[in-house]
Image (tube, rainbow, N blue to C red):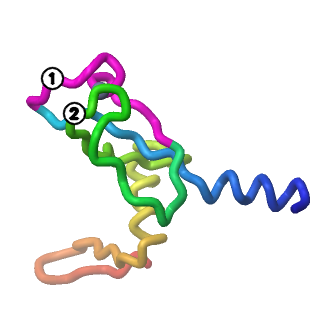
Amino acid sequence: MDALAQIAGVFAMPFYVYQVVEGRKGCPRCRSSFEELQSISAEPLRTCPDCGEEVERVPTAPNVGFSESGLDDRAKAAGFTKLKRIGSGEYERQY
Ligand SMILES: [Zn+2]
């Protein structure tokens, strides 16, 4: 495997952010959320590796800011069509 393929392999292994399910006690690790490197095909974690408390994945948007244009880009990438309302009953297709 060459270096580039190795780097591509790393990027194919995303970090998932987990946090203890709201209302659960958890431990310092999962209370403040933690990252877990997992392959895309891996089963999501259900429990904290430290305390075994129930955890859930925190939605994250890597490499994308929280600006509105970022949202648009993500919607576009996901295949959504954005319609802008330009008048009563009229919508302009933006992409
Ligand atoms: Zn924990």
Crowding at label 2, few (<14), some or many (≥20) Cα neighbours within 10 Å?
some
Viewer-closest of 30 and 83: 30
Identify the residue under disc 2.
53
The residue sitting at 44% across, 62% down in the picture is: 74
Horizontally, is 55 left or right of 25 in the view? right
Say if 78 sits above or below 57 in the image: below
**Can you give x and y, in whole percent of width and height, for residue 60 in the image?**
40, 46
Tag on residue 36? Answer: none
Viewer-closest of 66 and 52: 52
Tell me the SS state at disc 2: loop
Which quarter of the picture shows residue 30?
A: top left
The residue sitting at 39% across, 67% down in the picture is: 75
| Magenta-tinted stretch | 23-36
Q: Contact, CB < 8 Å: mark 1 with mark 2?
A: yes
The amino acid sitting under disc 2 is: Glu
Instruction: Give yes or no for residue 17 being in the magenta stretch.
Output: no
Outermost residue, top side? 28
The residue sitting at 9% across, 30% down in the picture is: 23
Quarter holding ligand 1:
top left
Tag on residue 25? Answer: 1
